Amino acid sequence: MKTKIKEFRAKHNMTQLELAKAVGVRRETISFLEKGEYNPSLKLATKIARLFQVSIEELFFFEDSELD
Amino acid sequence: MKTKIKEFRAKHNMTQLELAKAVGVRRETISFLEKGEYNPSLKLATKIARLFQVSIEELFFFEDSELD
DNA sequence: ACATCATGTTATAAATATATAACATTTATA
DNA sequence: TATAAATGTTATATATTTATAACATGATGT
């Protein structure tokens, strides 16, 4: 999975810690997410997307090969 | 969480079992999902949305209160 | 150089999604 | 009505997300 969290975070001048607190997770969770190291829950994905006021599809991307 | 999986499944004339196989999960998983009993992974949500050719936001809904 | 802040990383624990199996109930249909 | 198909439901196991704590690295500023 790939994500643009880092880009949107930069655009909003937020640190990982600030984003983490805003959506109620740990800083490490944001770090792992940004590196595509896991597949968040829909709920967490939704919280981050709403914070940045973008759609989930604008934030997270799966290769077709990942969906087989 | 609420979802329109059941409605889209009806529109596509699919059983829970057919949908489950199409996205690689168990039938029970679809049953629990349709009842809003849990929060799927983003990957599973993406697979179902792509199958029905709708956005994730058209398929799954969170109340604001669920996101606090 | 030193201190502070932001991020990376690793190991382990806790929580929760999903699998599995079994049986119950509802719905369709012969 | 009877039979099968679809869905509901419960209990337990497994996998994965997320939390937690600890320490490392990199950047920034004094």
Image: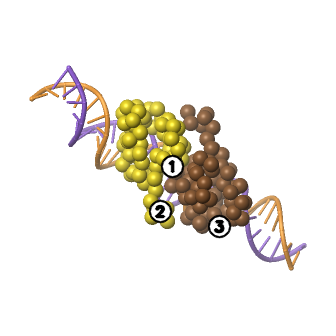
Chain colours: A brown, B yellow, C purple, D orange
Secondary structure beneath dot 2 equals helix
Q: Give the vertical position of C2 relative to A29 (above or below).
A: below
Which sits in the foreground, D1 or B49?
Answer: B49
Which mark, by number, is residue B27?
Answer: none
Picture coordinates of residue D15, whole percent (x, y): 51, 43
Q: Give the vertical position of C26 relative to A54 (above or below).
A: above
Picture coordinates of residue B54, whole percent (x, y): 51, 41
As drawn, is B16 to the left or to the right of A32? left
Which sits in the foreground, C3 or B1?
Answer: B1
Secondary structure beneath dot 3 equals helix
Q: Which residue was labeled with disc 3?
A: A18
Residue A62 found in image quarter = top right
Q: Which residue was labeled with disc 2?
A: B64
Mark 1 → mark 3, Cα distance in angstroms = 25 Å
Disc 1 crowd, CA 10 A, few/some/many (<14, 14-19, 20+) = some
Q: Of discs 3 and 2, which sits in the foreground?
A: 2
Query: Quadrant of the image for the C terminus of chain A?
Result: top right
Amino acid bearing label 2: Asp
Q: Label 1: chain? A: B
Query: Quadrant of the image for the N terminus of chain A?
Result: top right
Amino acid bearing label 1: Glu
